[in-house]
Image (cartoon, rainbow, N blue to C red):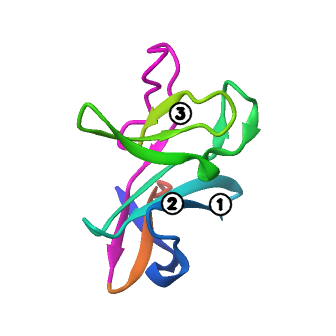
Amino acid sequence: MLKWQDICGVADLQPNSGVCALVSGQQIAIFYLPKTDTVYAIDNYDPFGKANVLSRGLIGDIGGQPVVASPLYKQHFNLQTGACLEDETVQILAYAIRIANGRVEMGLMEQQA
């Protein structure tokens, strides 16, 4: 079951761009597309460049899939699944994220008691 954690206000995001947020000790890249009022969240870590830089990547669309291009070596990662388009053996984590009442919330797995 997901527990929704407040991350920031929508006004804190950069339209059509990414920002980095520290969530539970993990760097998360959050991308905001105001035209569709959609947010995406993936790991900020680029496994090819071995650096936390994906929030600085360029967002776009390839074959109908929302993607971010790494600013280092330009690999594309699907913003919905985290899959690398150029190397199907590489995938980063994609997170549940939503906008609720002007706030950005990320879904985190609840710890079982």
Q: Mark 1 vs mark 2: which is more N-terminal?
A: 2
Alpha carbon of mark 3 to alpha carbon of mark 1: how far? 17 Å
In the rendered image, which quarter is residue 21 located in?
A: bottom right
Q: Which residue is rendered at x = 51% and y = 59% of the image?
A: 30
Residue 81, above or below 112: above
The region drawn magenta spans 80-100
x and y percentages locating residue 59 in the rendered image:
46, 48
Alpha carbon of mark 3 to alpha carbon of mark 2: how far? 19 Å
- Mark 2 secondary-structure assignment: strand
Q: Which residue is mark 2?
A: 17
Could you tell me which quadrant the N terminus lies in?
bottom left
Residue type at tag 1: Ser
x and y percentages locating residue 79 in the rendered image:
41, 43
Q: Nearer the viewer, mark 3 or mark 2?
A: 2
Is 15 magenta? The answer is no
Q: Which residue is rendered at x = 63% and y = 46% of the image?
A: 44
Q: Nearer the viewer, residue 64 or 95?
A: 64
Alpha carbon of mark 1 to alpha carbon of mark 2: how far? 22 Å
Q: Which residue is rendered at x = 23% and y = 37% of the image?
A: 64
The secondary structure that most of the magenta stretch takes on is loop
Q: Which residue is mark 1?
A: 24
